[in-house]
Structure formats: C-alpha cells, structure tokens
Image: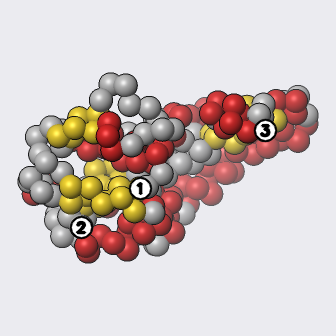
Amino acid sequence: MEGINAEQNMDMMGIAFAPSAPQGLHSKKHKSLDEVQDGTTVALPNDPVNQERAVRILEELGWVKVKPDAGTTDFNLNSVEPDQYEIKFEVLDPAQILVSLEDVDYGVVNGNYIANAGKKITDALKIENTPEEHRVIVTIDKKNKDAQWAKDLKAAYESSEFEEYINSESKYDGFILPEAWKNN
C-alpha cells in the first residue's frame, strides 16, 4: 500500500483484512515435492510482487536461495541463486500458469485462479505462508477514516455474518482468514 501511495500520490490506509487466497505450488506431473531434481521446470508469475512470493515458496523448500537485498516491487530472477537444485523457470502471465501445468514440472499458482477454476487451494503440494503485506486489505482514503460509511465497511468485513458466509462456501477452503474473526 505504501508503494501505491507513493507511486500514485495517494493517501490510502487499511481498515480491514479480507479473506486472502495464498499462492500454492501445483503439479500435474508430480505427486510429491520429493520428485524435484536438477533441470526441474517451475512456472512463475511474470509480475515482480507475485514472482517474489512464488520464489519464497521455493526458497522455503530449499530449492533456491534469494539474495538478501532482493526487493518486492522490483523483484526479478537475477535475485535468485541455486540451492539444492538447478531449477529452470518459465515466467508466465499468472492467469496462464494453471492451464500450463502440463507443460512444466511445477507451477506456483495464485490462489484466486485455483478457486475460480473450482479447484481447492488445499490440494497444492505446498501452500505459501502469506506475509501480511501480501494479504487483501480493504483500503480507503485517509481523509474518510472517521466517516460513518468507512466504519460500517470495516464492521461488515469483520462481522460474524461475513465470516459465516465465507466458512459456508467450500471454494474459500484454504483462504487466509482475517485475524479480526478470532474475536467473533
């Protein structure tokens, strides 16, 4: 949000978290993460933020290392070094990774594409531990922070009714749920 505020000369602030779909490592060719080897191909999103998130999954698995000075909004594959394996990357539009899984060994797919395809996020071989800065945040212009509609919007996102709806829909299985719901 800070990046967008600076880039667009805006003054936005977060008022609530929405359910967020984590990225996951998927494969149509492999049933296990143990099948990785030198030359394994992994499809990654082509935008810097989602690519950085995807590579962090691979780093957590020990497949690659990310240089300590790697940024998020300006991330690129020059920040990635081999770890246990020499991984080959296929960089694709995020919307194309799910349909391209037959052409690669593994692919890191944004959870919204999994959910929209009627698949389960929880079927991923590895699910991202999504940092707070990559979760969906409901934002408003700071000048409206005391407006009644902004308070009502926050209350709606944090309500037990919204929580019950999300929990009643199987397509949201595996989503990261707002911390505020722990108080419901």
The residue positioned 27% from the left and 55% from the top of the image is 89
Image quarter (top left, top right, bottom left or bottom right) of the C terminus: top right
Could you tell me if the residues under marks 1 and 2 are in contact, i.e. CB atoms within 8 Å?
no
Percent position of residue 87, x then y? 18, 51
The mark nearer the N terminus, 1 or 3, is: 1
Q: Which circle, 1 or 3, is nearer the viewer?
A: 1
Total labels: the figure holds 3
Residue 94 against residue 87 in the figure, above or below: below
From the top left corner, tell me how far across and down residue 106 is, in percent: 24, 61
Q: Is residue 15 visible?
A: no
Q: Earlier in the sequence, mark 3 or mark 2?
A: 2
Instruction: Choose between 130 and 80: the one closer to the eye.
Output: 80
Residue found at the far right of this picture: 147
Q: Which mark is residue 154?
A: none
Question: Taking 50 as reference, is 142 above or below it?
Answer: above
Quarter of the figure with residue 91: bottom left
Q: Position of residue 83 (x, y in %)?
A: 15, 37
Q: Nearer the viewer, residue 85 or 16?
A: 85
Q: Amino acid at mark 2?
A: Val
Q: Which mark is residue 104?
A: 2
The numbered dot on residue 45 is 1
Please tell me which residue is depicted at 22% across the width and 38% down the height of the picture: 81
Using residue 9 as the reference point, say whether residue 46 is left or right of it.
Answer: left
